[in-house]
Amino acid sequence: MPSWNIPLWVHNLIAISNFVFLIFILFFERKESRRRFVWILILFFLPSGIGIVLYILFSGHIFTATKRMRDLNATVWQFSAPMRERQKKLLAQRRTSLSNHVIKSFMPLVDMNLTEGNSLLTYAENTAIFTYGAAFFDDLCRELEEAKHSINMEFFIYRQDKIGTKVMEILCRKAREGVEVKLLYDDFGCFLTRVRFFHRLDAAGGKSRPFFLVRVGLPLTLNYRNHRKVVIIDSRIAYTGGMNLADEYANWNPRRKLNWRDTMVKMEGNCVLALQSNFLGDWYSQEAWLNRSKTIESMLRYFPPSFAQNFLDVSVGREDLMQAMFSKGRITTQVITNDPSDSKKANIEDAFIRLIMGARRNIYIETPYFTPDEEFQNALKIASYSGVKISIVIPGDWDKFFMKAASSDFAREMCADGIRFYIYPGFIHSKMLSVDGKVSSIGTTNIDNRSFSLHFEENVIFYDERFTARCDAIIERDMQHSQAVTKDFFDRKPLPVRAFWSFCRLFSPLM
């Protein structure tokens, strides 16, 4: 009886699998060529089997949109469908008589967000912009203490440190007082925070829930993280932006001194209900996911009638919708989201590119990571070649050395295209974009592949010159404190450093 050489059989099986994956990437992968090339390198050079595992978990191609994820997305989408159709009809009827001339100028963007991005037209008022963590945390705690009915919180990172503990104590106290408290945290982003810390809220009568649980086993959703940072209080006040609940965002962490600079926006108005609708969509979707609901009908059981009412409230529900939307003191907005279960996936990137295409004078961008894909990079180049002045603020200190290397190589190249870069003296984690002093965006999205196609993200677009002027003043102040650099600045770096930058840039599609 012949003996089986099991190690040889395993080796051959892995080699064949590796070859099959290479063929799949070459002929069936629909990503951009740069991304496909990186995966071919990984599969070719890494030891057999390792590249396959990495591709399955992190490519964003396999298991990105399982049927269950797509059905969850479709379930949420159908709730807002009547409101989208009504807004499209009203806009078509009244676009020539709209009082907001910014909206008129950027109507193609509004239409695209409404039709393809499920982004209802809303308004904000009584806005405040926080540029440092300490001020944001103080205001957040004060508003949480005043909560009467509900608190909805969603964070990528929530640490059990000074601010995290203080907020948890407030949440538990409010839950015991009868306030409905819901806390959604990304399980991977909070991997270093003990689960029993969140269970304190459950014991107090509130509810905590992890997003795509990864601590039990290694699920295939590991790559798709909830990067949103949102707080909604009493359906009246909302915060969103780049800050998580952790001491380093206020420079309070003695082990992580990076001179952290970030941006958070506080709003009232019915844009709060749009943010709340997105939060509840994430919340109830996770409940359906955890209970392994496999059909839209079974998922609907987890979405209460009040969820649909939220969309009715957003749309005002009267024929004077446009008059209410553009009343004096109100800022016209759209809340845009990214969701890897969406077949389009790039709602926020598409909106950014459309904004860049509409620019006539200037574009301001602040981002902690700058590793754009080909589409975004080409949009910036064309705008620059067309005479638009583009200024991009990036960090001087970084939390990830490989992102610094890859971003530096992109900046070096794009300086030659006439784009001006400013190196901030610290870690600027702000995610802001402004065009022509008319339209601005604040949210959670970085200029990198993970934010554009793999993470759950959320941004607010503000169609308002006064609000955008405030954003521009913040960015211009940051530029004044930063070092303006040219291509020569990067070219003077030693050859081994530039070689390392180029090597890290190879893997930017995966960062």
Image (cartoon, rainbow, N blue to C red):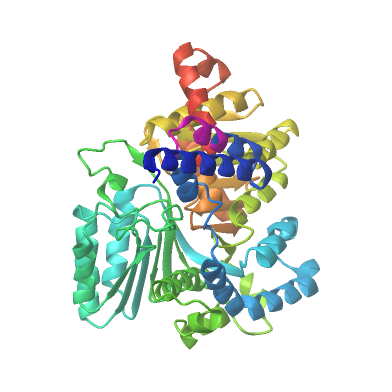
Q: Position of residue 450 (x, y in %)?
A: 50, 47
Above or below, comparing residue 342 to residue 324 in the picture: above
The part of the image, by quadrant, that contains residue 282 is bottom left
Between 188 and 333, the one lying in front of the other is: 188
Where does the magenta region start and end?
39-49
Q: Position of residue 62 (x, y in %)?
A: 54, 54
What secondary structure is the magenta-colored segment mainly?
Answer: helix
Q: Position of residue 162 (x, y in %)?
A: 19, 53
Please say whether residue 406 is visible from this viewpoint. Answer: yes
Between 67 and 272, the one lying in front of the other is: 67
Please say whether residue 481 is visible from this viewpoint. Answer: no
Residue at 61% across, 50% down:
349
The question of residue 330 being in magenta is answered with no
Residue at 21% across, 69% down:
199
Above or below, comparing residue 67 to residue 40 in the picture: below
Lateral position of residue 102 relative to residue 253, left or right: right
Outermost residue to the front: 1
